[in-house]
């Protein structure tokens, strides 16, 4: 039996293979598969690199494909004019082990993470959002803005940063998106229905009293020492996690707030509608290789 041709995709080609609509559906299916034990996705292995960098090894397997994401996250790269994340996602046929595709790692990470956030909005927000606040102006903010433009075109999106000129630059750089993008500084506008934090902050950037009509989504804090949401926001909310097992070690916001893990709910709980109708909601995303496997499925389906 001949081995299928191996596709090696650039960042642009990888993005083309991961349109947000199909990618969201692939992640939703992967969440159900992961919860049911049909995807094996162990906790990521983290190895140190100089200057607070880390090498992340993230494999996952299912009955159809296996993937291995190997990426390096180097926070100091921004000062050097380099991307924070470098790496690849290898996609393999599960039955033969033959490689099928090599995807751009940062693109997969950015788009599948944004897809998880979009699923949180779809399942946990009171209604389709008309006004969203992004806190942060890095690569993840860019991917989230693209996802919002694809799925909720025309909505208002405020971009908050500590330096207003960075927010202005972000808006200029993304002027082609189908969004009402506005630079912002200071407190989140009272009309914002969704707040998405996308920073590597070590101290909370948002700690307002939770509101039933505002969904909080935490993306950026992925180490125990990081925190984007403070204890007021955490303890006043019904908390959902994309990966409850990984969150215990990586969700710095929740760890620092002394969150009771027995109260945590999963992405599948949100997908299946197991949600208290009256409670404010906070969704914490830490990521796992199951979402990269979902991206691998999506990419292979696109490639045919």
Image (cartoon, rainbow, N blue to C red):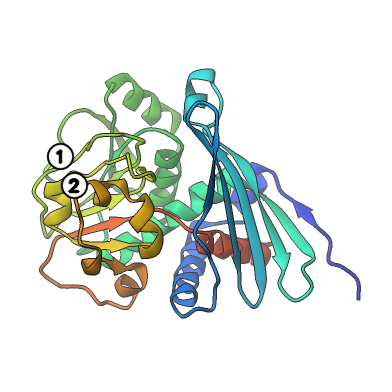
Q: Is residue 170 left or right of residue 296?
A: left
Residue matched to label 2: 192
Classify mark 2: helix, strand or loop: loop
Q: Please, is residue 41 above or below residue 201 in the view?
A: below
Q: Position of residue 79 (x, y in %)?
A: 48, 19
- On-image quarter of the C terminus: bottom right
Residue drawn at the location 22% of the way across and 44% of the way down: 229
Residue placed most toward the observer, 68 or 224: 224
Residue drawn at the location 79% of the way across and 73% of the way down: 96
- On-image quarter of the N terminus: bottom right
Q: Which label number is shown at residue 204?
A: none
Residue drawn at the location 38% of the way across and 44% of the way down: 223
Residue matched to label 1: 189
Residue placed most toward the observer, 139 or 56: 56
Q: Please, is residue 79 above or below residue 75 in the view?
A: above
Q: Residue furthest right?
A: 1
Q: Please, is residue 73 above or below residue 258 in the view?
A: above
- Kindly tell me whether residue 150 is visible in this rendering: no
Question: What's the CA distance linking mark 2 and mark 1?
Answer: 6 Å
Q: Position of residue 131 (x, y in %)?
A: 23, 48
Classify mark 1: helix, strand or loop: loop
Q: Is residue 217 left or right of residue 56?
A: left
Q: Residues within 10 Å of mark 1 (few under 14, many from 20)?
A: some
Residue placed most toward the observer, 3 or 178: 3
Q: Is residue 105 left or right of residue 279?
A: right
The answer to whether the residue labelled 2 contacts the one labelled 1, judged by CB atoms less than 8 Å apart, is yes
Residue drawn at the location 26% of the way across and 47% of the way down: 253
Q: Residues within 10 Å of mark 2 (few under 14, many from 20)?
A: some
């Amino acid at each position: 039996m001949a081995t299928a041709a191996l596709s090696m995709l650039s960042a642009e080609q990888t993005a083309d293979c991961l349109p947000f609509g199909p990618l969201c559906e692939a992640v939703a299916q992967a969440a159900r598969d992961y919860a049911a034990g049909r995807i094996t996705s162990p906790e990521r292995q983290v190895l140190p690199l100089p200057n607070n960098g880390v090498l992340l090894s993230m494999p996952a397997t299912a009955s159809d494909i296996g993937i291995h994401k190997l990426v390096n996250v180097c926070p100091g790269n921004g000062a050097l004019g380099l991307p924070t994340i470098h790496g690849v996602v290898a996609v393999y046929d599960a039955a033969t082990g033959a490689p099928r595709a090599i995807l751009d790692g940062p693109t997969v990470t950015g788009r599948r993470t944004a897809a998880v956030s979009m699923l949180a909005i779809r399942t946990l927000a009171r209604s389709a959002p008309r006004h969203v606040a992004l806190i942060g102006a890095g690569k993840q903010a860019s991917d989230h803005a693209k996802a919002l433009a694809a799925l909720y075109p025309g909505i208002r999106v405020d971009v908050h940063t500590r330096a207003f000129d960075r927010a202005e630059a972000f808006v200029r750089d993304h002027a082609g998106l189908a969004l009402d993008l506005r630079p912002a500084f200071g407190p989140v506008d009272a009309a914002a229905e969704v707040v998405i934090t996308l920073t590597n902050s070590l101290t909370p950037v948002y700690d307002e009293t939770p509101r039933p009509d505002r969904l909080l989504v935490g993306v950026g804090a992925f180490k125990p020492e990081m925190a984007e949401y403070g204890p007021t926001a955490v303890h006043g909310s019904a908390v959902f996690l994309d990966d409850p097992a990984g969150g215990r070690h990586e969700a710095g916001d929740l760890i620092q707030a002394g969150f009771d893990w027995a109260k945590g709910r999963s992405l599948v709980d949100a997908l299946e509608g197991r949600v208290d109708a009256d409670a404010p909601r906070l969704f914490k995303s830490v990521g796992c290789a199951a979402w990269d496997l979902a991206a691998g499925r999506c990419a292979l389906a696109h490639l045919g």
